Structures are given as C-alpha cells and as structure tokens.
Image (spheres, helix red, strand yellow):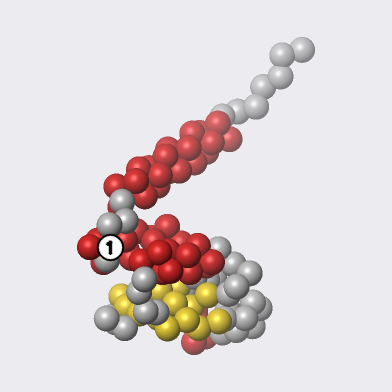
C-alpha cells in the first residue's frame, strides 16, 4: 500500500503524523507550503479547499483530519487502534456542533 500524506509541520497534520508513528506504517510525506502552494491548481485537485492534511491511497483521496485518522485506523485495524473510540469522539463533535449551530440560529431577544 503506497500512502502519501500532504501536510505542513505547522498544521493539524501533525496529528496524522502521530497516528502514523503509533501505527508503525510507511507513508511518503510531502511538505506543502502555506499560501500559493496550497492554493495551486495542482493541489486544489486533491483538496478543493486548499488545506492540509491530505492523504492519498491509490485512487482514494481524503482531506479532512478526522476522516484521515478514521481511514487509517480502519485500514490498519490489525494494529489494534480502537476505531470505535474515534467514531464515538466524532459523533460527540458533530452533536456538539449541531447544538451550537441551533443556539446561534435562535433569535436573540433581550428582556428589559
């Protein structure tokens, strides 16, 4: 399996680096500079949002941190990483964001 990680040492991609170390897997790591390189036409083909990290596994391209971590945990399940804990964390994040979004969409009223 030939994995390629597009990342930047000053991004959240370091989380993927830690996971790769924990899993003990080989990944080609490509440092992508902020600014023009992340917004280049070539990179935007991988991630239309022009951000890192991006993981490429053959024809599969994943460009969200949590999705990359879940994908790696699933692909290397024999390494014993508890994928169910990662999924549970993701559900909590989604529920939390939904609650905040609901609160923000409520009309603001003042009792005077």
Locate the N terminus and report the quarter of the image it occupies. Answer: bottom left
Q: In this orientation, which residue lies closer to the viewer: 17 or 51?
A: 17
Q: Residue at x 77, y 12 (%)?
A: 112
Mark yes or no: residue 96 visible.
yes
Instruction: Provide residue 41's location: percent of width, then percent of height.
Output: 52, 85
Residue denoted by label 1: 79
Residue furthest to the top in view is: 112
Mark yes or no: residue 68 visible.
no
Instruction: Provide residue 81's location: percent of width, then percent of height.
Output: 32, 56
Instruction: Provide residue 67's location: percent of width, then percent of height.
Output: 38, 60
Q: In this orientation, which residue lies closer to the viewer: 47 or 82?
A: 82
Mark 1 neighbour density, 10 Å: few (under 14) some (14–19) many (20 or more):
few
Q: Which residue is drawn at 48% across and 78% down?
A: 6
Residue furthest to the left in view is: 78
Q: In this orientation, which residue lies closer to the viewer: 50 or 92?
A: 92
Q: How many labels does the image show?
A: 1
Q: Residue at x 36, y 50 (%)?
A: 86
**Residue 21 located left or right of residue 9:** left
**Residue 106 located left or right of residue 112:** left
Q: Quadrant of residue 35?
A: bottom right
Is 111 rendered above or below residue 52?
A: above
Is 59 rendered above or below residue 22?
A: below
Instruction: Provide residue 10's location: percent of width, then percent of height.
Output: 63, 69
Q: Residue at x 49, y 41 (%)?
A: 97
Q: What element carries label 1?
A: helix
Residue furthest to the right in view is: 112
């Amino acid at each position: 399996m030939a994995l390629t990680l597009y990342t930047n040492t000053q991004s959240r991609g370091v989380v993927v680096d830690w996971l790769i170390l924990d899993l003990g897997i080989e990944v080609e790591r490509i440092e992508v500079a902020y600014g023009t390189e992340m917004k280049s036409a070539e990179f935007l083909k991988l991630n239309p949002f022009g951000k890192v990290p991006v993981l490429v596994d053959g024809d599969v391209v994943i460009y969200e941190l949590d999705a990359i971590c879940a994908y790696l945990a699933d692909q290397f399940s024999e390494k014993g990483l508890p994928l169910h804990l990662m999924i549970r964390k993701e559900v909590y994040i989604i529920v939390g964001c939904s609650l905040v979004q609901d609160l923000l969409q409520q009309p603001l009223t003042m009792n005077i």
